[in-house]
Amino acid sequence: MRGPVVDEAEAVLDRLVTDGVPASLMAKNAQLWGPEAVEEASRRLGWLDLPETSRPLLPELAALVERVRADGLDRVVLTGMGGSSLAPEVITRTAGAELTVLDTTDPQQVASVVADRLERTVVVVSSKSGGTIETDSHRRVFEQAFRDAGITGEDLARRFVVVTDPGSPLEKTAREAGYTVVLADPDVGGRYSALTAFGLVPSALAGVDVARLLDEAAALVPALHQPYDNPGLALGAALGASALGGRDKLVIADHGSGIAGFGDWAEQLIAESTGKEGKGILPVVVEGPDAPGFAEAEDVRRVLLGARPEDSGLGVSGPLGAQFLLWEYATAVAGRVLGINPFDQPNVQESKDNTAALLRGAAEGEAPTVVAGEPALVVGAVEVHAPAELLKGATDLTGVLEAVVAAIPEHGYLAVMAYLDRFADAGAERLRPLLAQATERLRKTPAAVTFGWGPRFLHSTGQYHKGGPRNGVFLQITGESAQDVPVPGKPYTLRSLQLAQAFGDLRALRSRGRPAVRLHLRDRAAGVEQLLSALA
């Protein structure tokens, strides 16, 4: 079947071939994304060589795995954010290997992880910059927990494996503490780092055959050099052409790919790489091909991971190692088509700065809750914080949520951002399909609805929210915590850090005029059920 989208993608593909993009990209030509991107791009193209340059890690990893097992440590906890955690989670889930990923500041979730099988735990601390506040907090909390359990000195040091870039503050701290350090390739950005030490170290410790991932990626490399029959070039052309033509929502569903959670990894790669300068491709990860939000729409480009039924959108399949490299290549190509630099993230820092300012206030005795103000409405366990003009006189939660849906502009989207425990409060994820159904029911045309756990989405779609097209509406959910966790050596707790991150991001969104509502759950379980019932 042909149509405007197919014709436009083919025209873009032909232009990419004519411009010699496949050869230039594989030769790491930093000029591909324009003169302003050269400095950044010249330091961020090492991912193209990873199927080979990561192989020297394999003997080191084998020795590390043997040592950790000999120490009786068979539970692996990974503390990391964004590119440091999303790829290992996909790798281990797909392989059926156990890996506990800690990419949250939720005190209940962190406390639960720390309390589980501590005597058998090895902690992988992953941070490219070495200064990620969440990961630094996790490291401090685990160090204290081990000491409290009587694990000190060399025994404690053997419980930590640190993955970071050469020369980072974390490398210095780790070496002084006697921790095992594995250095990553500094010429690879975090979201392109699946096949670096960031993806391979925790996965290998969890028991995955990581050499196979490199083999799978290496098998794709010859095709990526080709001007024709190049799957990475074709996918990148399709993504870029669709966005230029107004189909800037990339709705991703899995249909028997055999890869677990791939959409969450692709979400960060695409959103953070393309969402800037008022442009971008918004990934919308849905629960399956039959889920609300996967239907054809004029601003949607659908992608099925795995087998593709007829008329169900673009089909992409292949083994996991190849998929990592394929989507990285395609995203870089889409960046060229859109005329943006796919390797920077210029709007991520603002929320971090706001968080830091709020934490300084907390250190001086001002709790982050002071920033929240009085709720506009309280319904049972749910506080509603929003401007009156956005609520439009709503007196119950159904009215509030309908007002949020009504605020979505034409061809816009709704982002649900939940600063909760993504395991104990997992029911909150059901809000995405219910809200997508609400857009179908209440609007002339349905709107895309995304769901992200905070603060992990700040290292992912958070860039798109602030740097992409100004057509988003934001529903933030925070909640009371039954417990708190001090951060040793810092004047704040995880609860205050989590709230500071939520309020800092809300401040960044509202400063840009983005419509945003915060729902605070005085009781998490009851609050989630109320919200779900309001949409039933």
Image: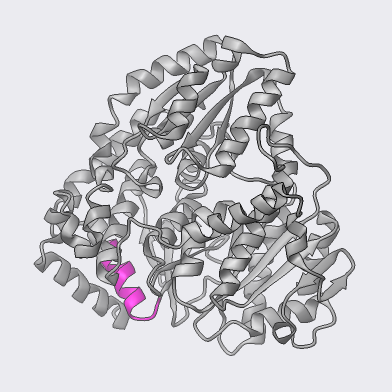
Q: Residue at 77% of width from left, 56% of height from top?
A: 479
Residue 495 placed where, x, y %? Answer: 73, 47
Furthest residue in direction front, as rendered: 364
Relative to 462, say whether 187 is above or below.
Answer: above
Which one is nearer the viewer's eye here, 411 or 304?
Answer: 411
Q: Residue at 57% of width from left, 76% of height from top?
A: 514
Question: Start and end of the magenta stretch?
Answer: 235-247
Furthest residue in direction right, as rendered: 380
Residue 397 placed where, x, y %? Answer: 80, 75
Taken as a whole, is the magenta stretch helix, strand or loop? helix
Name the image quarter holding residue 439.
bottom right
Name the image quarter holding residue 5.
bottom left
Is residue 536 in sight in this rendering? no
Whether residue 237 appears in magenta in the rendering, the answer is yes
Q: Quadrant of the C terminus?
A: bottom right
Q: Quadrant of the N terminus?
A: bottom left
| Left or right of residue 182: residue 522 | right
Q: Residue at 44% of width from left, 83% of height from top?
A: 298
Furthest residue in direction bottom, as rendered: 444
